Image (cartoon, helix red, strand yellow):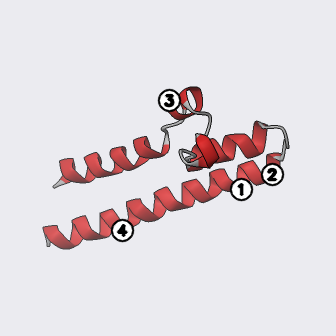
Amino acid sequence: MPGLFFLVIICVIWSFQVFDVVYVMTNGGPGYSTTMLVTYAYDEGFGPSRNFGYGATVGLVLLVITLAITAVQLRVSRRQEA
Protein backbone atom coordinates (compact mmCIF):
# COMPACT_ATOMS: atom_id res chain seq x y z
CA MET A 1 0.00 0.00 0.00
CA PRO A 2 2.73 2.59 0.67
CA GLY A 3 4.08 1.96 -2.83
CA LEU A 4 0.66 2.52 -4.38
CA PHE A 5 0.20 5.74 -2.39
CA PHE A 6 3.57 7.01 -3.59
CA LEU A 7 2.80 6.10 -7.21
CA VAL A 8 -0.57 7.85 -7.22
CA ILE A 9 0.84 11.06 -5.74
CA ILE A 10 3.82 11.12 -8.11
CA CYS A 11 1.56 10.51 -11.13
CA VAL A 12 -0.78 13.34 -10.07
CA ILE A 13 2.13 15.73 -9.67
CA TRP A 14 3.62 14.61 -12.99
CA SER A 15 0.30 15.11 -14.80
CA PHE A 16 0.24 18.74 -13.69
CA GLN A 17 3.78 19.25 -14.99
CA VAL A 18 2.97 18.50 -18.62
CA PHE A 19 4.05 21.86 -19.95
CA ASP A 20 6.87 21.58 -22.44
CA VAL A 21 5.24 19.18 -24.89
CA VAL A 22 1.97 21.10 -25.01
CA TYR A 23 3.62 24.50 -25.25
CA VAL A 24 6.13 23.55 -27.94
CA MET A 25 3.82 21.43 -30.09
CA THR A 26 0.55 23.37 -30.01
CA ASN A 27 0.95 26.48 -27.82
CA GLY A 28 -2.51 25.84 -26.43
CA GLY A 29 -3.89 24.32 -29.60
CA PRO A 30 -6.56 25.52 -31.93
CA GLY A 31 -9.12 27.36 -29.88
CA TYR A 32 -7.37 26.59 -26.56
CA SER A 33 -8.28 22.91 -26.91
CA THR A 34 -4.97 21.64 -25.47
CA THR A 35 -4.47 24.31 -22.84
CA MET A 36 -3.52 22.79 -19.49
CA LEU A 37 -3.64 24.53 -16.11
CA VAL A 38 0.14 24.97 -16.15
CA THR A 39 0.22 26.47 -19.65
CA TYR A 40 -2.64 28.75 -18.69
CA ALA A 41 -0.70 30.00 -15.66
CA TYR A 42 2.37 30.58 -17.85
CA ASP A 43 0.38 32.47 -20.49
CA GLU A 44 -1.24 34.67 -17.87
CA GLY A 45 1.99 35.38 -16.01
CA PHE A 46 4.48 35.67 -18.83
CA GLY A 47 2.32 36.12 -21.92
CA PRO A 48 1.42 39.38 -23.60
CA SER A 49 -0.77 40.52 -20.69
CA ARG A 50 2.05 40.13 -18.10
CA ASN A 51 -0.49 39.62 -15.33
CA PHE A 52 1.94 38.20 -12.75
CA GLY A 53 -0.55 38.20 -9.87
CA TYR A 54 -3.13 36.17 -11.75
CA GLY A 55 -0.49 33.71 -12.95
CA ALA A 56 0.72 33.27 -9.37
CA THR A 57 -2.86 32.75 -8.20
CA VAL A 58 -3.37 30.00 -10.77
CA GLY A 59 -0.16 28.39 -9.51
CA LEU A 60 -1.45 28.50 -5.93
CA VAL A 61 -4.73 26.93 -7.02
CA LEU A 62 -2.69 24.18 -8.65
CA LEU A 63 -0.87 23.66 -5.34
CA VAL A 64 -4.15 23.49 -3.40
CA ILE A 65 -5.56 20.95 -5.86
CA THR A 66 -2.45 18.80 -5.50
CA LEU A 67 -2.58 19.01 -1.71
CA ALA A 68 -6.28 18.10 -1.67
CA ILE A 69 -5.70 15.04 -3.86
CA THR A 70 -2.80 14.02 -1.63
CA ALA A 71 -4.92 14.40 1.52
CA VAL A 72 -7.75 12.32 0.05
CA GLN A 73 -5.33 9.63 -1.08
CA LEU A 74 -3.67 9.59 2.35
CA ARG A 75 -7.03 9.24 4.09
CA VAL A 76 -8.10 6.40 1.81
CA SER A 77 -4.74 4.68 2.25
CA ARG A 78 -4.92 4.87 6.05
CA ARG A 79 -8.52 3.63 6.07
CA GLN A 80 -7.61 0.57 3.98
CA GLU A 81 -4.66 -0.31 6.24
CA ALA A 82 -6.80 -0.38 9.38
Question: Mark 1 belongs to which amino acid?
Answer: Thr
Q: Amino acid at mark 4?
A: Val
| Disc 4 secondary structure class | helix
Q: Which of the two labelled residues, at mark 3 and mark 4, occupies the earlier sequence position? A: 3
Q: Is residue 24 above or below residue 32?
A: above
Q: Amino acid at mark 3?
A: Val
**Residue 72, horizontal then vertical, whole percent:** 36, 68
| Image quadrant occupied by the N terminus | bottom left
Q: Nearer the viewer, mark 1 or mark 3?
A: 3
Q: Give the number of the mark in front: 3 or 4.
A: 3
13 vs 55, left or right, is left
Q: Which residue is mark 1?
A: 57
Among numbered discs 4 and 2, the one appearing first in the sequence: 2
Element under disc 1? helix
Residue on which the image places disc 2 = 53
> Mark 2–mark 1 contact, CB under 8 Å?
yes
* View extreme (top): residue: 24
Q: CA distance from mark 1 to mark 4?
A: 23 Å
| For residue 78, side relative to residue 74 (left or right) | left
Q: Is residue 45 or residue 25 the one in the foreground?
A: 25
N-terminal label among 2 and 3: 3
- Compared with 26, 51 (above or below) is below
- Asked whether 31 or 51 is in front, the reply is 31
Q: Which residue is mark 4?
A: 72
Between label 4 and label 2, give the one nearer the viewer.
Answer: 2
